[in-house]
Amino acid sequence: MAVAAERVPEEQLDAALKALASAPRREIVRFLIDRGSDGGKTCCRSDEVCGCKLSDHLGLAASTVSHHMSLLRDAGLVTARKDGTWVYYTVRRDVLRAVAASIVGM
């Protein structure tokens, strides 16, 4: 039996929904969930995606991707780890589950 996700506070739910209201940010979350699989050719660990991969995947400038990622981080939907000049992102599946649970009343 699956354990129901906890609901998030209304303020966090609002921030998450605002962040996900943008098509590029929804695509980023989808890409992070899929871990940017590229047939084994990757500069990333299996649980994270480098900003360079996001920029390539979306066809957007690094600065635009950075802006989108900042909003997703502020909403608590992703985490970031800086390593030298690169930033590696991980989706917060627990938060996404909690957002979904808050919407459908699970």
Image: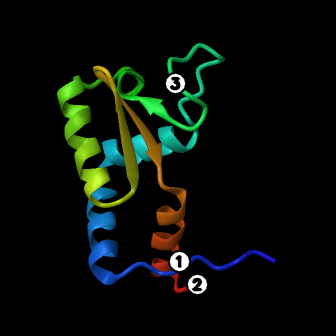
> For the residue carrying disc 1, how many other residues have a C-alpha within 10 Å: few (<14), some (14-19), or many (20+)?
some
Q: Quadrant of the N terminus?
A: bottom right
Residue 44: image tag: 3
Reply above or below: 30 against 20. Answer: above
Q: Which comes before the other along the chain, label 2 or label 1?
A: 1
1 vs 3, front mark: 3
Q: Which comes before the other along the chain, label 1 or label 3?
A: 3
| Image location of residue 94, percent across then percent down | 53, 63
Query: The disc labelled 2 sits on which kind of residue?
Result: Met
Residue at point 29% right, 43% down? 69
| Image location of residue 7, percent across then percent down | 47, 81
From the image, tell me which residue sits under label 1. 101
| Image location of residue 91, percent across then percent down | 47, 48
- Which sits in the foreground, 49 or 80? 80
The reply to whether the C-beta atoms of the residues labelled 2 and 1 are less than 8 Å apart is: yes
The picture quadrant where one finds residue 41 is: top right
The picture quadrant where one finds residue 24 is: top left
Residue 64: image tag: none
Tally of numbered discs: 3
Query: The disc labelled 1 sits on which kind of residue?
Result: Ala
> For the residue carrying disc 3, how many other residues have a C-alpha within 10 Å: few (<14), some (14-19), or many (20+)?
some
The reply to whether the C-beta atoms of the residues labelled 2 and 3 are less than 8 Å apart is: no
> What separation in Å lies between label 2 and label 3 (alpha carbons)?
34 Å
Query: The disc labelled 3 sits on which kind of residue?
Result: Cys
Residue at point 49% right, 44% down? 30
From the image, tell me which residue sits under label 2. 106
Q: Which comes before the other along the chain, label 2 or label 3?
A: 3
Query: Farthest residue in the right direction?
Result: 1
Residue at point 23% right, 46% down? 70
> For the residue carrying disc 2, how many other residues have a C-alpha within 10 Å: few (<14), some (14-19), or many (20+)?
few
The picture quadrant where one finds residue 57 is: top left
| Image location of residue 64, percent across then percent down | 20, 32
